[in-house]
Amino acid sequence: MARRAGNQRASEPGTGDGLWDRPVLMDLLADLLFLVGGVLLAWSAMVGLQSLPIFPLQQLVVTTPLDRVSRAQVEHTARTALGGNFFTVDLAAARAAFERMPWVRSVSVRRLWPDGVELRIEEHRAIARWTPQEGESRLLNSHGEVFFASTEAMLPKLAGPDGSARRVLERYRAFADALAPTGHAPVLVHLSERDAWQVALDDGVMLELGRDQPRHPLAERLDRYTGSIAAARAAVKGRMPEIGAVDLRYPNGFALRANKT
């Protein structure tokens, strides 16, 4: 006899395919929960460790001599910059805070076992005052970097368009070396927007050098001044009005302008 067909129905598509029937997805979900829990546990442990009175910071050691930065400035900054304990102190944030102090060029901060922080400070060494075409005066360090600080020191003045500080500083050094045989030094070096140079000397004479050109470079014009004009000024001293300016922009000569009386 033929067997009667059963009354069981075939499973519909998707039946039995829930999350609990997918072990791979369950494993991924479990791994994700463990990861989130581990991160939260680590964060809680860090917060708790920072609040515990263990390994507190007891000393700040400055390993470099300081001329411009005072001890009071360092201590004031340390009170706000050095938070936490030996393990949790944020050295990057502390370095940024110390570098915001006046006269500070760069800072190195590291932990000093078991309860201290070591601080190395490099100060700016100002060699000139810098005045851009527009804006208030700043100071210029030996690296050609512009910074803001106050000083009463008598410094040469350099001026030029924005972004030309390093270039003007290099020219100032070259001009100072070239003028050394005359016994005078530049007290002002100015670069105009049209790339023309002016140099004021410590005896009041203004040198109009003009633009640097391949056929008539600035060095050649300064040699003309140091080799002939300076000697002529010494020879006729007292027998002619004092020279106020020397125009060296001519290719084969120069023009003198006397001081106004």
Image (tube, helix red, strand yellow):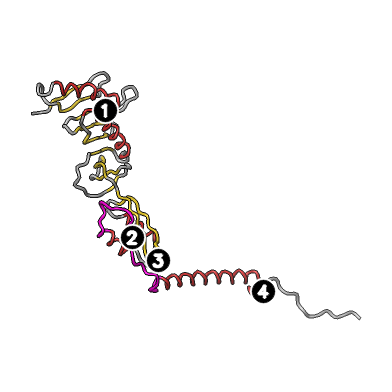
**Circle 1 SS class:** strand
Can you tell which mark lies on residue 61?
Answer: 2
Establish if 223 lies above or below 62. Answer: above
Mark 4 or 3: in front is 3
- Give the residue number, with chain letter if any, for mark 3: 114
Q: CA distance from mark 1 to mark 3?
A: 62 Å
Amino acid on which the number 4 mark rests in the picture: Asp
- Asked if the residues shown at circle 2 and circle 1 are in contact, with their CB atoms under 8 angstroms apart, the answer is no
Q: CA distance from mark 1 to mark 4?
A: 86 Å
Residue sitting at 35 percent across and 57 percent down?
119
**Circle 4 SS class:** helix
Asked where in the image residue 73 lies, by quadrant, the reply is bottom left
Asked where in the image residue 227 lies, by quadrant, the reply is top left
Label 3 crowding class (10 Å Cα cut-off): few <14, some 14-19, many 20+? few
Q: Which residues are magenta?
A: 50-73
Label 1 crowding class (10 Å Cα cut-off): few <14, some 14-19, many 20+? many
| Precedes in sequence: disc 4 or disc 3 | 4
| Precedes in sequence: disc 2 or disc 1 | 2
Q: CA distance from mark 2 to mark 3?
A: 13 Å
**Which quadrant is the N terminus positioned in?**
bottom right
- Give the residue number, with chain letter if any, for mark 1: 210
Q: CA distance from mark 4 to mark 2?
A: 63 Å
Q: How many marks?
A: 4
Based on the picture, tell me whether residue 189 belongs to the magenta stretch: no
**Which quadrant is the C terminus positioned in?**
top left
| Precedes in sequence: disc 4 or disc 2 | 4
Residue 14: x, y in percent? 68, 71
